[in-house]
Image (tube, grey):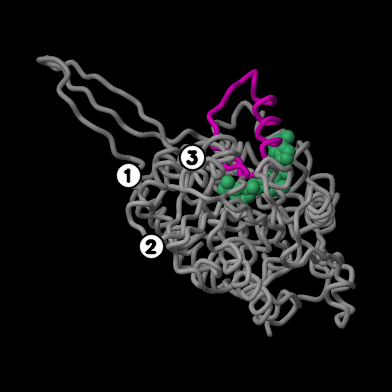
Amino acid sequence: MTKALNAVKTFHNVINGKTVPSSSGEKMDSYDPATGKVWATIPSSTVEDAEASVTAARSALPAWSSLPAMERANYLRRIGDLLSEYADELAELETKDNGWVIRETKHGLIPVLTSMWHDAASAAILGSKGETVQVGTNTVGYSLREPYGVVVGIIPWNSALWTFTIKAAYALAGGNTVIIKPSELASVASLRYGEIIQSILPPGVLNVVSGTGAEVGDALVRHPKVNKVSLTGSGNTAKAIAQSTSQQPKPMILELGGKSPNIVFEDADLVKAAQGVTLNGIFSGNAGQICVGGSRILIQRSILDEMIALMKEEVTKNISLGNTMDMQTAMGPVANEMQFKKVCSYIELGKQEGGEVIVGGRYGGATLLPNNEELADGYWVEPTLLKVDSNSLRICQEEIFGPVAVIIPFDTEEEAIAIANDTDYGLGAGVWTSNLDRAHRMIRSLESGNVWVNTYRLVGTELPFGGKKNSGYGTDSVLEYTREKTCYIQLS
Ligand code: NAD
């Protein structure tokens, strides 16, 4: 078992190369969702702190943006290399912050962060490449790529280090300077991560400021010297940012929610599919709190009973709740009290809407972990599968963002496509089949930014990751963090 972090610790903002408290000296408590108890404090920053971070990022911009791409790449590669020294600490902080079990943060998350920094280093040169064309007899035209300037990355509580990295690494690769605003509900890992990274970078190139979305987030996105915003979060926050920036529109990347279908056909390897749609699809992805969580499991009616039996077996055998720092624990709690109440109310709504509880349905640390007093007040929810008859129910349409999935039967491929696309979201989709033609037909028909066939949730940092419909637009990539400039030269 990994050594637990016991005493309440204090974390600071990272502004202009220094770790600093909020200018008001105010702090906010951070809760460990496994226990429901305070374990750390973070700065409750103000508009002044937001201003200081923009000033720092602006001052650092001329030198950083004019570095040759290969030199910026060297910095990014060194950050990736440095992470192995801090892997255990960062994994523990992320686990304490949002309840994502240590066996996933340590073995799944941290190695991916290293790859992202290395991949961003390789991509830096792409972010500086243009084209040359002879436009007229004596005119040469060429395009070059330039950074936007100061980029603000607004990130959520469920996957802080991953979303921090995908924004910061590619924006820095493109020559921008960056401010990350983590969620007030889980900022610790990001503050410490920022401190580690800034030890390699020139002051002000990367800044991290914690605080509420309404105050610090809003001050950052509406700041006239911020040139691009990338949000990973909810649709409501995207709307609020669009409103705040309406008088001075700025380009945005929006990575929003999902209600992803995971579709199992009768010709699939059912044992593999049962594991894929339960463990990998939803429950082991941070207790379902992952944007691509396969929260709608569509099963062909001819195999419904067999699949339900297999899925029950997978969940019962393989999903254990318990101490999040224990390598044996497969699923952690819901990340905060507000989310816990929301998820529990959706379970009750699902029952009222006629959903049949196939697995789970209970919640509360005292109920689920009666022999572990320390976890009694934690935000624990059982992995829950509800069988329903209609995709129009609220539990099939609204993002629950917890360890809850619905099972929806279908008869034909056409019906599966219609149900899968009958949602406002379009982030992820899974297809389980042994028929190659069908796999290709499904890939083309699904209105989704990412499609997985006979696997789920695998993300290669070399490929784009983005959504369609209300799941957002744009991708955190070096091409989207740089823009083209066109130039014509008349030769005599
Ligand atoms: P949220 O929208 O409540 O908060 C996200 C961030 O926005 C936080 O840092 C918050 O402080 C900030 N914020 C809130 N109001 C703001 C405002 N007016 N101006 C500026 N910033 C503001 O989202 P959350 O609850 O933290 O995260 C869960 C959501 O994120 C889910 O919908 C989930 O699907 C989505 N998500 C999407 C992806 C993806 O890649 N598509 C990945 C992870 C999470």
Quadrant the N terminus occupies: bottom right
> Which residue is denoted by mark 1 in the rendering?
126
Magenta segment: does it hold 241?
yes
> Relative to 36, is 387 above or below?
above
Please state the horizontal and vertical placement of residue 331, each as a whole percent of the image.
Answer: 69, 70
Residue in the image at 24% along x and 19% along y: 488
Q: Amino acid at mark 2?
A: Ser
Q: Quadrant of residue 358?
A: bottom right
Report the span colored magenta: 231-257
Q: Is mark 1 within 8 Å of ligand 1?
A: no
Q: Which mark is residue 434?
A: 2
Please state the horizontal and vertical placement of residue 217, each as a whole percent of the image.
Answer: 71, 38
Residue in the image at 90% along x and 72% along y: 366
Q: Amino acid at mark 1?
A: Leu
Left or right: residue 283 compared with residue 201? right
> Which residue is denoted by mark 3 in the rendering?
447
